[in-house]
Image (cartoon, grey):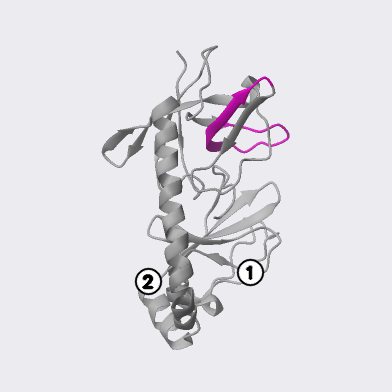
Amino acid sequence: MEQKYINYIGPSMNPLLRNGDGLHIVPYNGRAIRRGDVIVFVPSGRETKIVHRVVSVDAQGVKTRGDNGKQVDPWVLTADNILGRVTYIQRKNRRRNIWGGFMGRVAACSFRCLHGGDAVISFLLHPAYQSLCRSAFLRNKLHRLVKPRVLSFNRPEGMEQQLVVGRRPIGRRRPGKGYWEIRRPFRLCVDESLLPECLPNESAREGCKCTPACGARLCSVRNSLESEGYQ
């Protein structure tokens, strides 16, 4: 049985998967694809591998969604699009099984419940959070303390920048967009005026115009799994 290993990058399957996780992939080889399976696939017309969970299987094909996503993906997959199922991940020195089928659906449901509770709490605390975010002094001090790094990735649409603290992505600027999407609560400690002024269409050879204050001493450009939505 042919098996493959790839590294995961992106927020679409958080909290199940994290940046840097090694994914063990087993091809289906004619076996049934089940709702709840976590699969690696390449949609028609694309070249980038994506890791999402199967939400439906019918005569039309297979539909997927990221555990951290709010909507079902727009594509319908066939067996030719699917590289295989993620059976376990390697995170540092620990190995963790990834359940599919019924147990996978239970896991996905629990993640959605967590996201729902997070949305309620966010609504209640939003006014106070926004007030703190408007404090330029607080953002500047926390930014220099946290020292986020900026990574650049080649995407089919152009150059995407991601903001990372340690190995955790906390924000990104999509190709062609002039603004950053910052995850809560990290907007409290990110001063966008200190971030580099890379243009989305700049090439890896041109590099990143980083300012010393941004804490991003190196912008590395590499191919990775595509993040489907920053939600």
- From this view, report whether residue 174 is shown above or below residue 46: below
Which quadrant: the N terminus?
Answer: top left
Quadrant containing the C terminus is bottom right
Distance CA(mark 1)–CA(mark 2): 20 Å
Q: Is residue 28 magenta?
A: no
Towards the viewer: 49 or 150:
49
- Whole-percent x, y for residue 45 in the image: 73, 34
The image position of residue 18, as x and y in percent, is 41, 47
Q: Residues within 10 Å of mark 1 (few under 14, many from 20)?
A: few
**Boundaries of the magenta span:** 41-59
Instruction: Give residue 62's position: percent from left, percent from top.
Output: 62, 27
Specify which label sits upstream in the sequence, 1 or 2: 2
Q: Mark 2 — residue?
A: 146
Q: As drawn, which residue projects farthest toward the right? A: 45
- The answer to whether residue 17 shows anywhere in this view is no
* Secondary-structure class at tag 2: helix
**Three-letter amino acid code of the residue under disc 2:** Val
Residue at 53% across / 21% down in the picture? 33
Disc 1: which residue? 179
Q: Where 200 sits versus 38, above or below?
A: below
Instruction: Specify the quadrant of the image occupied by residue 206.
Output: bottom right
Residue 87: assigned label = none
